[in-house]
Image: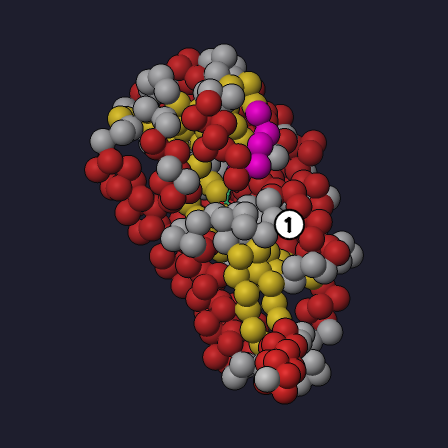
Amino acid sequence: MMLRTALLALILQLLALPAGAEGPIVIKFSHVVAADTPKGKASEFFKRRAEELTRGRVKVEVYPNSSLYKDKEELEALQLGAVQMLAPSLAKFGPLGGKEFEVFDLPYIFDNYADLHRVTQGPVGASILRQLDGKGIIGLAFWDNGFKSFSANTPIRTPADLKGKKLRIQPSKVLEEQVRALGALPQVMAFSEVYQALRTGVVDGTENPHSNMYTQKMHEVQKYLCLTDHGYLGYAVIANKKFWDGLPGDVRSQLEQAMKESTVYANRIAQEENERSLELIRKSGKTQIHVPSKEEREAFRRVLIPVHARMEARIGASLIRAIYRETGFDPNRP
Ligand code: LMR
């Protein structure tokens, strides 16, 4: 009997042992959105391809939905090496000293995914990722999400409808300025807290692509949605640089390959995921969806495009111009 107990204790001890020298390299990949979103799906795709290509030498543990860390904590955790990979929204790099990333938050700077890809898949995007050099972080890729709508509990048709409203935003100075331009009050808040804040009326409204709204059930506590497409929300996939540089060369190349494939996948599914979410919001019957008229769209553009000029000092006029050149954006177009 004693022998059996001792044997059982030994087996349990062995099971609890951390991976030794022979064990796989573990990558903890934390993010704040639901698994059933463009980023959630792309991180699972990366996990699968990384494990396949390295033949199990790497194990990727994906922690979705702020289950491990919330927005601010995850950035600290990456720098400390408590997690190895993240894909924060481009609006969240300010605290890391990555002000240039906020250029993606400028209202209407991208008309569509094709314009966006000219930047994220080209030299301007690469130069933005390089801003992370020297900060203990390596920028690996840009992953798409999509274009944002405004939501609230009162109808939204023109900028005047948002006047005086408290709107939850991500921690970006550009988004703060955007909300002020509307005459509304910006309220920075972690993504994991938005649903509750909307439900209890701590904030009146918010902005996000539809996949984020639907998977966090925001539409259940927001009666009105206006398809403004007024700005873009996407991600930079980043890793702890010391960890990445310390990987065996062959493993690093395999992970780079897995990242390349995941980026193609992420950017292929993002638009349809957002369209699917909008359909599901519509079907829920809980939110009235307004498609702005040409005049209403123009009213939003007139109020929001001046944010570009106001943010030049923060982001850099030359970076903003470089993006205009890539996309053909004309700030004087009505
Ligand atoms: C948000 O905070 O609204 C988004 O950045 C969440 C995300 O990661 O898409």
Q: Which of 13 and 151 is in front in this view?
A: 13
Residue located at (71% from left, 49% from top): 76
Residue located at (69% from left, 34% from top): 314
Specify the quadrant of the image occupied by residue 110: top left
Up/down of 305 relative to 29, above or below: above
Q: In which quarter of the image is the N terminus?
A: bottom right
Instruction: Say whether residue 193 is visible.
Output: yes
Q: Is residue 285 left or right of residue 18?
A: left
In the rendered image, residue 160, in percent from the top left (x then y), is placed at 42, 13
Q: In this view, does 2 lie to the left or right of 283?
A: right
Name the residue beneath numbered marker 1. Answer: 74
Residue extent of the magenta highlight: 187-191
In the rendered image, residue 108, in percent from the top left (x then y), is placed at 46, 34
Q: In which quarter of the image is the C terminus?
A: top left
Q: Does the magenta stretch include residue 263?
A: no
Q: Which of 149 and 240 is in front in this view?
A: 240
